Image (tube, helix red, strand yellow):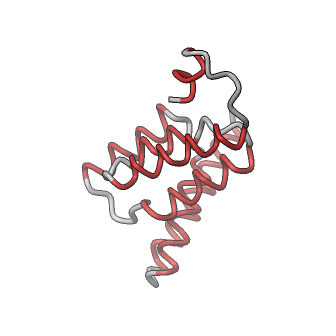
Amino acid sequence: MQQTLVTLGYTHLSDHVAALTHTNFATQLEAHGLWHWAIFVVLHLRDSSRRRIAVQDLLLRHIEIDDTPEYVKREQFLKEELGISLVWIHQAKAIKSSINKRYLTIIRIHILRIFIYLNLKRI
């Protein structure tokens, strides 16, 4: 959306207005159940710390512990198309599992992270 405004000649917009445009659009997408696309939008925030916080907040609100077919597609989209860090995804799952007192799930997530780490070290 911001790129469209720039293309139309609105180059005078401040970083604050650009961030507000992205955040408002992401909020609308999230309200319509398109939280994974909201992550796509906030990935375009210029400020890296604001971008990281926005993505992690969306993940914490919408990450699912139990893998339904629809959710698996969305998580795959996050990882493969948007390049969202597995660490961020697993961290959000661990936090949500802790909140829901699902301690075995937390253990599985940490074992999976260790397995990924060990496999990456071999490469």
The residue nearer to you, when weighing 110 against 31, is 31
Where does the image place residue 11, in percent across and percent down from the top left?
Answer: 68, 22
Where 115 falls versus 17 (above or below)? below
Residue under the point 47% across and 46% down: 26
The residue nearer to you, when weighing 95 against 56, is 56
16 relative to 32 in the view: left or right = right
Where 96 falls versus 28 (above or below)? below
Residue under the point 52% across and 79% down: 98
Where does the image place residue 68, in percent across and percent down from the top left?
Answer: 27, 56
Task: Count numbered badges in the picture.
Answer: 0
Q: In the picture, which quadrant includes the C terminus?
A: top right
Where does the image place residue 38, in percent across and percent down from the top left?
Answer: 46, 45
44 relative to 39 in the view: left or right = right
Where 38 falls versus 105 (above or below)? above
Where does the image place residue 41, in percent across and percent down from the top left?
Answer: 51, 38
Residue under the point 47% across and 74% down: 97
Give the farthest residue toward the left.
Answer: 69
The residue nearer to you, when weighing 22 against 14, is 14
120 relative to 3 in the view: left or right = right
The residue nearer to you, when weighing 111 against 25, is 25
Give the farthest residue toward the bottom.
Answer: 101
